[in-house]
Image (spheres, helix red, strand yellow):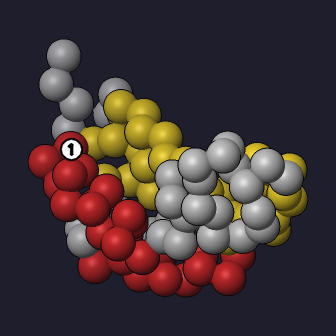
Amino acid sequence: MDFKFVKIVVFVPATHADKVREALAESGAGHIGNYDCCSFSVKGIGRFRGLEDSRPFIGKAGKIEEVEEERIETICPSEKLDEVLAAIKKVHPYEEPAIDIYPLLN
């Protein structure tokens, strides 16, 4: 089954949330009807531990870190997904950004 749209969810440090939202909009995500730059955010705490070969943006390898993050979600046409993911990765500070993609039925 081909999906016309996907929902993109990305977790980002609060300090970089605006940059990621801008990258999403500029690359074609967040367009709903007569509106653009559409997204939803919620704040929370992200936890992680970088392994030995990691280069964490925040903290040190081997130590569990807690970071104030935003969960940003938006809609994206399936044909623009690669472009949108590249735009996220260009501005996201993490070595391995957490990005979820969900196909939408309508």
Question: Is 41 located above or below residue 64 in the figure?
Answer: below
Compare residues 67 and 3 and report the one nearer the observer.
Answer: 67
Residue 98 at x, y percent in the picture: 55, 48
Mark 1: few/some/many CA within 10 Å (<14, 14-19, 20+) = some
Residue 100 at x, y percent in the picture: 49, 41
Q: Quadrant of the C terminus?
A: top left
Query: Which residue is at 35% across, 31% downward?
Result: 103
Q: Is residue 12 left or right of residue 27?
A: right
Question: Is 28 located above or below residue 74 in the figure?
Answer: below
Q: Is residue 62 left or right of residue 23?
A: right
Q: Is residue 97 left or right of residue 56?
A: left
Question: Is 59 located above or below residue 3 in the figure?
Answer: below
Residue 21 at x, y percent in the picture: 47, 75
**Which residue ends up furthest to the front in the rendered image?**
52
Q: Quadrant of the N terminus?
A: top left
Q: How many marks?
A: 1
> Is residue 9 at all visible to an observer of this figure?
no
Compare residues 74 and 52 and report the one nearer the observer.
Answer: 52
Query: Which residue is at 38% across, 64% downward?
Result: 89
Q: Is residue 95 left or right of residue 46?
A: left
> Is residue 75 at all visible to an observer of this figure?
yes
Residue 97 at x, y percent in the picture: 52, 54
Question: Is 1 located above or below residue 50 in the figure?
Answer: above
Query: Which residue is at 59% across, 76% downward?
Result: 17
- Element at badge 1? helix
Compare residues 52 and 81 and report the one nearer the observer.
Answer: 52
Q: Quadrant of residue 7?
A: top left
Query: Which residue is at 16% across, 25% downward?
Result: 2
Q: Which residue is mark 1?
A: 78
Residue type at mark 1? Ser
